[in-house]
Image: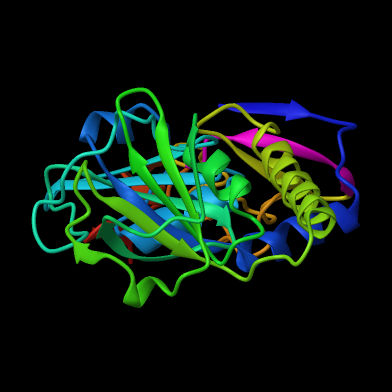
Amino acid sequence: MVFRISGLSLPLVGLLAFLTVVSAYSETYVGCSSIGAALAGDQVTATSIAGCNAACAAAGYTYAYFANPDSNSNYCGCFSEGPASGGNRDPESGFTDCGNDQSTVYALATDYNFIQCYSSPSSDDTTSQITNDACWDHCKTYTNALFQYASNHFNCICSNVAISSDGSAETCSRSAYFAYSHTPFSSPSLADRRRRRLERMKREQLVMNRFCPSGLEACKVPGSEDSFECIDTSSELESCGGCLYGSYTNATASAGIDCSILTGAALGGTTCSAGRCEISACQDGFKLVEGRCH
């Protein structure tokens, strides 16, 4: 299925900025959630946490949920907002291992780095915030930001005390404080300018995600720099497994295949299924062997 949307363009500078921003952002652990939470997001194909993070960031999202309940199932849900205050679950093992029966949640658009979870940390500033992002923003002039999931809010602590010497490290459970560090800004004005820059970058990311409906990819149209097609590359015969002429939003995406011109394949004897060409009939003089015409 193909939708053609002509006349819509993103300035080259904006596109390059988007590609740079994705690689500059830090991937930061924010906890465990349910498998259902991952399924509620826009789904992309991924087989690992790192792959899910990369796919969601490339699609313009700021949060990624990955779950693999068994060897045959992987779920990667992309979101533009972080988890709800009451949505955290205890890890299955270790300090942060969410295991196979839960989703692992990462933030993709913050300069904060996850350190560890702690109990009873010191505080220079304690507040209640609606989201974890709001806590990070509130603590922008401090070295550390720590938040605790509560029933309908986040308990937020800002601190300049070295996290390694403060409090007791513990499993990242519902009652723990998730501790993060970053390079603080020396004045609120600098922090505000940086916050506005991050918000602008996030908006640029989200613009990329609005090009095509969920499940379709924006593909370049040959001969027209200002046009693209929204294609389901999982089933499109002439652009199977990716964009034949390149992705409009992801310069590093793998190119697709035109299944209709496979060597030896009969006219109408090919289909695209799950992003792979499948041959059902060959031309005279060719024989179908292990899915290929020889």
Residue at the limit of the structure toward the top, as seen here: 152
Q: Residue at x 87, y 40 (%)?
A: 9
Return the residue nearer the eye: 2 or 22. 22
Return the residue nearer the eye: 111 or 142. 142
Main secondary structure found in the magenta portion = strand
Instruction: Count how many numbered circles sit on residues in the image.
Output: 0
Horizontal and vertical percent for residue 169? 22, 66
Q: Residue at x 44, y 59 (%)?
A: 28
Q: In the visual, does 20 lie left or right of 193?
A: left
Q: Is residue 21 visible?
A: yes
Q: Is residue 241 visible?
A: no
Judge whether 71 appears above or below 9 on screen. Answer: below
Q: Which residues are magenta?
A: 224-233
Which corner quadrant of the image does residue 216 belong to?
top right
Q: Is residue 269 magenta?
A: no
Q: Quadrant of the C terminus?
A: bottom left
Judge whether 143 appears above or below 79 on screen. Answer: below
Horizontal and vertical percent for residue 114? 41, 64
Q: In the visual, does 9 lie left or right of 183?
A: right
Colouring rule applied to residues: rainbow
Judge whether 114 appears above or below 164 on screen. Answer: above
Horizontal and vertical percent for residue 7? 90, 32
Q: Residue at x 86, y 44 (%)?
A: 10
